[in-house]
Each structure stands twice: as structure tokens, then as C-alpha cells.
Image: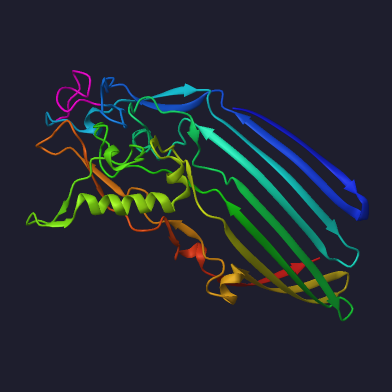
Amino acid sequence: MWRSNLAIDQQLPGGIVATLEAIYSKDRNAAIHRNYNFVTPTERLSGADNRLIYPASGPRIASGFTGPDGQFSFLDAGVIVLENTNKGYQYNLTGQLKKDFANGLYLTAAYTYSKAKDVTSNPGEIAADAYQRNPVVGNTNEPQLAYSDFGLQHRIIAAAGKRFAYADDKLATTLSFFFEAAQGNRFSYTYAGDLNRDAIAGNDLLFVPASRDQINLVDIRDAQNNVLVTAAQQWTQLNAYIEQDDYLSSRRGQYTERNGAISPWYTQLDAKLLQDFSVKAGNKKHTLQLSLDVQNLGNLLNADWGVRRVFANNRFIETSYPAATPETPAFQFRGGNQTFVNNTDFNSRWRAQVGLRYILD
């Protein structure tokens, strides 16, 4: 990787320090993965979605590679080779203002814009996992340059703090805050199932239909073959789902991009309180410091604040090849009515930590 970094600090009137910084990185020999056992797909779907697919019958795997049991499986047959690419790049631009006041108050604020693209973000702990988890359109061995898994697109941070000393500096209280607002956790819309027949489920990027005739929806039935949701009902639900999603509605008649979708903005306010108790013994200063850290303070003050939003389901269309029509994939809509829901995990909750520290000066 080649990386360039340029930054400048400028003293402004009023004691304000302004910083501008740019970082640009270019992949020179980044790792990518290919399965050398896969044949090159030559068949295509018919219709608006005409992606390359692997054959329904006949070898998907080069001859001479079968599992110990004589049956095909990806792990039996996969020969994952690491190659190199120079297509990826990343850059970010940051502007910051800060000021330290004579009374001990400090203020700082910064904004960062980032963009990162790669051929694979290596989404796995081993080569086979990284290969299988990289969403594609068509040929699994030809991943395209797309948005990286990593890096927020927009990030705003601000911090403020002040130390209050009293009782001849034997007691001191420090109060500080840190605020963050950001957008840019990226994710991919893929099918539930194996549309391109590469024996890997969940790695096929979605084709967003512009009209009902661009997707072969079939009835959802129970075990007794009773119709639960008709194809017509599913289209009404799917169409409404696409319309409420800004990204999907912008991709009508097109494929979704790897990591093309982006999460909503989130905000978080953290606070820190330090209380110092100091005594002098000889030429030494002994300080006992109590600390209280509150992360996501907003959520402590109001249950609706500091709650992050995450996608509910990024694989809301199931696909399969029915036995009656093995060359024509069928689809079923299994989504809800909205893309994003409140995240109830650790990041959306307030939490506090109490600490005790002894300092010898």
C-alpha cells in the first residue's frame, strides 16, 4: 500500500488553532481470493436480471477435484488462491478547530469525510470464508471494485472540558464531555439462497425490480400446500418496501452494490467526572482520584436518545430453482415494512464506570 499524508496547523485570531489534514492510500498489492477449481460460468439468467450463473447440471468444479466421499462440497473442492490487485483506494479529509482558554477550559470540534473502496474487505478469518462472504454479481471469481466494509463516510466529533481547583489545589473537579455524530456503517443487500448456483448461499447481490414482470414471485405455502401469501400480495409488499428505502428505490432496474447501502446517522454523548483529593508530604504530592465515566449520557437522560438504527433484514428475498422449472429461479418476499429498526444491543444503552486511582507526583 502507498499512503500519503498532508496536514497543516494554522493559528487564527483569538487563539484558535485550525487543522486541515488529508490522507490518501492506494492499494499496490492487496490480497484477493479466487477458487481455482471453479469453471468459468457461461450461462445467463433471462430477463432484466441477466447475470452469469453456473450450470444447473454438469461440472461447476474443474475435473479431478472431488471430496473424500465422492460428493461435491465447497470445502472438499475449494482451492482458494490468494492473488494481488491494485484497484483499491481510501482517502479521508479532516477539518478541526480547537482552543485552550486561560481559565482551563478547552473546546475542540472536527469533521471527517471518508471514502474507501476495495475488491474485497477480507470478511473472514480464513481464505475460504473471505472468498464465500464477498458479495458478487455473477462470476464469484471476478469480484468488482466496490465500497469497503470499513470507514464511516461522515463523522463529527466535539469535546469540551474544564478543571476547577479549590482549597489551595487540595481539591479539584474536572468535568469533560465528548460528542460524536456519524453516518456510514455500510452493508450489502443480497439474496437468501444461491441464485448464481456457485454453491455459496447469501453472496449474490440483489437485482432491484422496477416492475412486477422483472421478478418471478411465487406463492408462499405451508407444509400442507395451502397458500399463505400470494405472489400478487408479495409484489405489493416488496414494492412498498423498496419505495421506503432510499437506496433500493434509487437502484430500480439495477443491481445493488457491495456495501452500497448505508446506515442512518447516530449520535452519542459521553461524560467524565474526576474528583481529586490531594495532600503534600515533604516534596511529594499524593492524589486520590475518583472517576465516573458515563457513556451514551443522552440515553440515561431520555430513553429515545442515543439509540442507533440498524437494518432489520438485508436478505429479504429468498430464491430457489424449483424442480419443475430448474432453469428459472423463483423468488419469495420475506421482509417486513421498514429497513431500519432500533438497535437494542450494548451500543444503544447508557453505561457507567466508577474508578479509583492513586497518583504520586
Position of 76 relative to 241 (above/below) = above
Q: Is residue 287 left or right of residue 88?
A: right
Q: Main secondary structure of the magenta part?
A: loop
Extreme residue in the left direction: 224
Residue 56 quadrant: top left
Q: Position of residue 11 (x, y in %)?
A: 89, 47
Q: Position of residue 27 (x, y in %)?
A: 56, 27
Residue 172 quadrant: bottom right
Q: Quadrant of the C terminus?
A: bottom right
Residue located at (52% from left, 54% from top): 264
Residue located at (50% from left, 51% from top): 263
Identify the colour scheme used. Answer: rainbow
- Number of numbered markers: 0
Say which of 211 and 33 sits in front: 211
Extreme residue in the bottom direction: 167
Residue located at (73% from left, 67% from top): 176
Q: Quadrant of the N terminus?
A: top right
Q: Position of residue 360 (x, y in %)?
A: 77, 67
Q: Position of residue 336 (x, y in %)?
A: 33, 58
Q: Is residue 309 left or right of residue 56?
A: right
Say which of 81 and 247 sits in front: 247
* Residue 62 magenta: yes
Extreme residue in the right direction: 13
Highlighted range, magenta: 54-68
